[in-house]
């Protein structure tokens, strides 16, 4: 009986095992809304003390490949805003609107590893990863507890990281989401850990929370996503610098 069970397990693994690329594709192909609007809180923590708390509004489209963020609090940052448009065949557009200077500042490719508003998120962390830009390998799996660890190594792209290891689960049949992630620096030393929180809204699993910890500096950032509305019919034409100059309602 034990032999039959063992053979069944081996046969199951042979028939249903998948490659790293297949797993990455399943995560990437999760059903997503056309666009999202939300009000967020972002806490910057140094050691065990809250250093700063931001209140912000974000609008995004096409899986956040088009995104705008406006800062509401604290008062000295009110009106500061960010625009991102990701491109497949050219450098991504990233621009900060600085109301105190009445001007916008383009984020250059060489600055993508810089901190976003003093947080533990870099500008690169705000972008999607193109499937074709990485080599994938499943480095660990736990069938009983329904999770995998996926290693993603960049292929000749400009990035601050040498690799990511992402813990992934099948939250319901055919739907895969990230639970946690480790990101390593160019010296292959652990730089950041990330914890994701998803919630099902309508037919979609939407990120409701993100905790990023810089293990080398003992700092962390906690992002909480609230007041989510989906499929708002945002037009492409609204994602321009001029839109950043006016706070949304």
Image: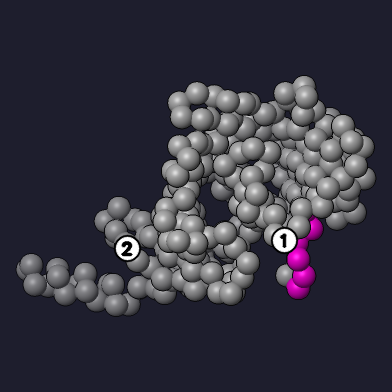
* Res. 216 mark: none
Among the 4 quarters of the image, the one containing residue 222: top right
Residue at figure coordinates x 83%, y 32% from the top left: 79
Asked if the residue at tag 2 contacts the one at tag 1, i.e. Cβ–Cβ closer than 8 Å, the answer is no
Counting every numbered tag in the picture gives 2
Above or below, 91 relative to 190: below
* 142 displayed left or right of 172: left
* Residue 39 percent coordinates (x, y): 70, 32
* Residue 234 percent coordinates (x, y): 83, 49
- The region drawn magenta spans 89-94
Q: Secondary structure at mark 2?
A: strand
Above or below, 54 relative to 207: above
Q: Which residue is mark 2?
A: 140
Q: How is the image coloured?
A: one colour
Helix, strand or loop: magenta stretch: loop
* Residue 42 percent coordinates (x, y): 62, 32
Residue at figure coordinates x 8%, y 67% from the top left: 2
Q: Which residue is mark 1?
A: 109
Above or below, 199 relative to 139: above
Residue at figure coordinates x 46%, y 29% from the top left: 47
* Quadrant in which the C terminus is drawn: top right
Give the mark nearest the N terminus, 1 or 2. 1
Among the 4 quarters of the image, the one containing residue 159: bottom right
Q: Residues within 10 Å of mark 1 (few under 14, many from 20)?
A: some
* Residue 228 percent coordinates (x, y): 68, 37
């Amino acid at each position: 009986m034990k032999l039959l069970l063992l053979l069944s397990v081996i046969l199951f693994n042979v028939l249903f095992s998948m490659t790293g690329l297949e797993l990455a594709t399943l995560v990437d192909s999760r059903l997503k809304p056309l666009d999202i609007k939300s009000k967020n809180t972002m806490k910057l923590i140094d050691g065990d003390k809250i250093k700063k708390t931001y209140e912000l509004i974000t609008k995004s489209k096409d899986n956040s490949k088009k995104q705008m963020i406006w800062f509401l609090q604290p008062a000295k940052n009110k009106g500061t805003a960010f625009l991102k448009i990701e491109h497949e065949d050219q450098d991504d557009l990233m621009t900060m609107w600085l109301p105190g200077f009445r001007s916008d500042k383009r984020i250059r490719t060489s600055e993508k590893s810089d901190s976003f508003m003093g947080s533990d998120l870099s500008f690169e962390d705000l972008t999607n990863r193109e499937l074709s830009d990485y080599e994938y390998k499943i480095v660990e799996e736990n069938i009983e507890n329904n999770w995998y660890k996926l290693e993603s190594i960049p292929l000749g792209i400009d990035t601050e990281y040498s690799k990511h290891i992402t813990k992934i689960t099948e939250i319901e049949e055919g739907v895969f989401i990230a639970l946690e992630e480790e990101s390593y620096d160019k010296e292959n030393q652990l730089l950041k850990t990330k914890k994701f929180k998803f919630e099902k809204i309508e037919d979609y699993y939407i990120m409701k929370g993100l905790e990023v910890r810089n293990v080398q500096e003992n700092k962390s950032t906690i992002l909480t996503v609230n007041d989510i509305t989906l499929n708002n019919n945002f037009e492409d034409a609204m994602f321009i610098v001029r839109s950043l100059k006016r706070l949304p309602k």
